[in-house]
Amino acid sequence: MTRYIVKRVLLAVVTILIICAITFFTMHAVPGGPFNSEKALDPATVKALEERYGLDEPLFIQFINWMKGILQGDFGVSLKNGREISAIIGESFPISAKLGLMAMAVAMSLGIVFGSLAALMRNKLPDRIIVFFSTLFTAVPSFVLATLLLLVFCITLQWIPVWDANNPNYILPVVALAAYPMAYITRLSKTSMLDALGQDYIRTAKSKGVSRLKVIFKHALRNSMIPVITYAGPQIAYIITGSMVVETIFTVGGIGSKFITAINDRDYTMIMATTVFLATIMVIANLICDLLYKAVDPRIKFD
Amino acid sequence: MENKDKNLPKKSFLSTQIDLSKFAPATDEEKAQQDVMSESTTFFKDGMKRLFKNPLAVLSIVLLSLILFTIIFVPMFVPYEYDEILKVDGKRDRGAQNLAPFEYSEMEQEFIANGGERFPHILGTDELCRDYFVRVIYGTRVSLAVGLFASIIVLIIGLIYGSISGYLGGKVDLVMMRIVDIIYSLPDMLIIILLSVVLNEVLVFKPGTILAELGTNMISIFIVFGLLYWVSMARLIRGQILSIKENEYILAARSIGAKPTRIIKKHIIPNCLSVIIISVALQIPSAIFTESYLSFVGLGVKAPMPSLGSLANAARDGIMSYPHKLVFPAIMICLIVLSLNLLGDGLRDAFDPKLKR
């Protein structure tokens, strides 16, 4: 077990390092420097500026310096508005985290409930309805769903107010974000529930005279949850990328919409910082899910 | 029934030999029963038969063929181009902006009143006075082409990498799979966005060549797919080859002296073909999703070329007044992705022998 954890943590650290390297070196492959502007600057000024920001050093030394800064929580300043990037992340990330966690909770709980219902009522009407909607929602891109929700509920029907930073209403962004993972989890937990219900220990429990509810909750459900936990890692990745789109559409000032704005503005320092930050979160989340998966299911070998 | 044939050898009393006199030769009718009436099916035919019994899979095949037919042949009959700004009698029609489906602009109405013929704008026009129907059709073409090519790139790289790793095994396999592990754990969407941003600035093509026509964004989508998405395909193929390699028929083929090339061609490839087909069918919709996502972020295909994602994204600006402009490309994306998903599921049920009941 310890060996496995050490191995996984090392792999995660290597991955984060690789992401940092890719981000840094690809961004530096873009032609033009930060001081190329319409007004031609005096070469002496440029040189002084480059010296001031350490841009005259070899690229690798710059990378080391950049990494040192990141480890101390210093992501540099945004090229567009000159603000500290760590401050921007600090104020926008909590909103995104709240949105993402809510979406995840909704997707997980409803997905498991619907999936198990579908499995228990196999080939009956509820099953068919659930399968229909879960198949449909895996085919709708999140930006289409988000735009339609905004159009229908905020503008046409006016049931739900548009996003307001002082009085945020999370319902629509959460629905838009949770729809795809929920559909996926529903399908996943249906198959795994069916699989669990066909196992020998279920028959044993039934033949011992255990009540139906206890069989479902204590034996079948607990075993069918395992594949759903494995999907939690990819789901976090999906929710982080999906939140960029959803936040932009609902004008939620989260880190995702800041990333999209940075891309459209070609704000390279901001792109670098947010990529590294979000990627690190994804890698860590994946690591936790992996370890959790092994901890939950003792049948899995540690290799 | 007693056999009265006198030529049968006489059975001695204590012999354990079967008493042949109790058996009768089979009649012609009985012999005919042993003949195989139907042709022997191959694995492929068997799978296809099961596929066509699946109503959802058949429905998705019909839908996909309809979509393919539309995007190939319909542009021949519609007299507009995807980047053509509408003109009436050689004059620019400034009133043809944002028309509703089947609506004519004032200039066109006048033209028709004077006896001219005008092809209807089936889905209206966009904000730059271009026929929207043709744009949606071209967008579908672009999106499907992106999905297909991206999947082929993934397939080729994954197939080569996975089969080398699986066939050689040992240390080579270990190192190759470590590389795959690391690429697999990279957050692909972030890296795609990052690379697209950079490649857009770095890649410059000579104007007039095919590459320039496609635009840097499209090329960078392909490059990114080629760099990142092949890993799951490589893993899949390696796993298949590893398990097939252990089978007795491979050992048998090797023991009668079959060469490795023959074993790969005749035994390994046909056996993992179904898995490959299924995963390619499921790869296309994910590539279409990725492309539409990149278009949304503003990193999709180059204007004026449309893709379904960029059309849907452009439609968001006028969503209050012209919701139909979002709805049509969105329905198209959903239909394509849905039918490809269903087809992939159907193929898996039909060809994956593990699920055979």
Image: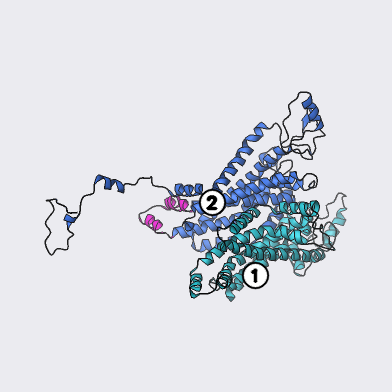
Chain colours: A cyan, B blue
Can you tell which of label 1 and label 2 is closer to the viewer? 2
Q: Please tell me whether residue B255 belongs to the stretch shown in magenta.
A: yes
Q: Which residue is denoted by mark 1 in the rendering?
A: A288
Most extreme residue toward the top, as rendered? B115
Image label count: 2
Does residue A246 appear to the left or right of B227 in the view shown? right
Q: Which kind of residue does numbered mark 1 sit on? A: Ile
Residue range in magenta is: B246-272
In depth, the one of B300 and B97 nearer the eye is: B97
Place of residue A145 in the rendered image (x, y in percent of width and height, measured from the top left) = 71, 53
Q: Main secondary structure of the magenta part?
A: helix
Place of residue B7 in the rendered image (x, y in percent of width and height, measured from the top left) = 12, 51
Place of residue B257 in the rendered image (x, y in percent of width and height, measured from the top left) = 36, 54
Callout 2: few (<14), some (14-19), or many (20+) C-alpha neighbours within 10 Å? Answer: many
Q: Which residue is denoted by mark 2 in the rendering?
A: B346
Q: Chain of mark 2?
A: B
